[in-house]
Image (cartoon, rainbow, N blue to C red):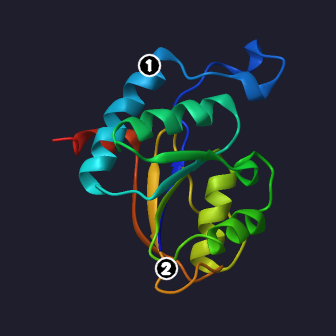
């Protein structure tokens, strides 16, 4: 299995909203994510499925990524909501086909904790995702804590440089 973790793009300021769930991407965030998505596609031309946090900014980011992968399905995954334990995401991953290439769109610090756990088996945030960044974690067998291998971790700007 190949797993692409993607942090949502730049969103509106938190202080402007009563509910964090309704924060949308800024126009600049959308523009930068479109460039990053094209770079992601150049680096990884095939995705099986995109799963996203149900929060608006993550859903919008997933839609931008989906636009460069024609015909791909996007599903809402509550386990990617802020504050949910990485074990919930792992349970979902284990239910997916072993040969899948999945993209998960979520939030910090949760993505960093998930990545750290999948790579080291320890729930530690030694991996950090900037807005719009993506990482590829590969599993030789079924996904499990401490069994992933980090293939790459790129910022949105680095991804944008790959768009060709």
- Whether residue 86 is visible here, answered yes or no, is yes
> Which residue occupies the foreground of this view, 121 or 34?
34
Kindly state the secondary structure of the residue where label 1 is placed: helix
Q: Residue at x 53, y 18 (%)?
A: 26
Kindly state the secondary structure of the residue where label 2 is placed: loop
* Number of residue marks: 2
**Residue 125 locus on image (x, y percent):** 66, 61
Q: Which residue is mark 1?
A: 28
Image check: 54 left or right of 156? right
Residue at the right extreme?
A: 18
Asked where in the image residue 111 lies, by quadrant, the reply is bottom right
Residue at the bottom extreme?
A: 141
Mark sitting on residue 139? 2
Crowding at label 1, few (<14), some or many (≥20) Cα neighbours within 10 Å?
Answer: few
Q: Quadrant of the C terminus?
A: top left
Asked where in the image residue 136 lies, by quadrant, the reply is bottom left
């Amino acid at each position: 299995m190949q797993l692409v973790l993607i942090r949502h793009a730049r969103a509106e300021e938190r202080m402007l909203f009563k509910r964090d769930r309704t924060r949308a991407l800024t126009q600049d965030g959308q523009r930068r994510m479109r460039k990053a998505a094209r770079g992601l596609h150049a680096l990884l031309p095939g995705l099986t499925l995109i799963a996203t946090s149900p929060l608006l900014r993550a859903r919008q980011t997933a839609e931008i990524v989906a636009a460069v992968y024609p015909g791909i399905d996007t599903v809402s995954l509550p386990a990617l909501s802020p504050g949910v334990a990485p074990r919930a995401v792992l349970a979902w991953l284990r239910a997916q086909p072993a040969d899948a290439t999945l993209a998960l769109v979520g939030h910090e610090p949760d993505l960093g904790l998930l990545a750290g756990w999948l790579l080291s088996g320890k729930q530690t945030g030694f991996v950090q995702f900037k807005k719009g960044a993506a990482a590829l974690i590969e599993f030789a067998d079924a996904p499990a804590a401490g069994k992933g291998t980090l293939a790459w971790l790129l910022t949105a700007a680095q991804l944008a440089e790959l768009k060709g």
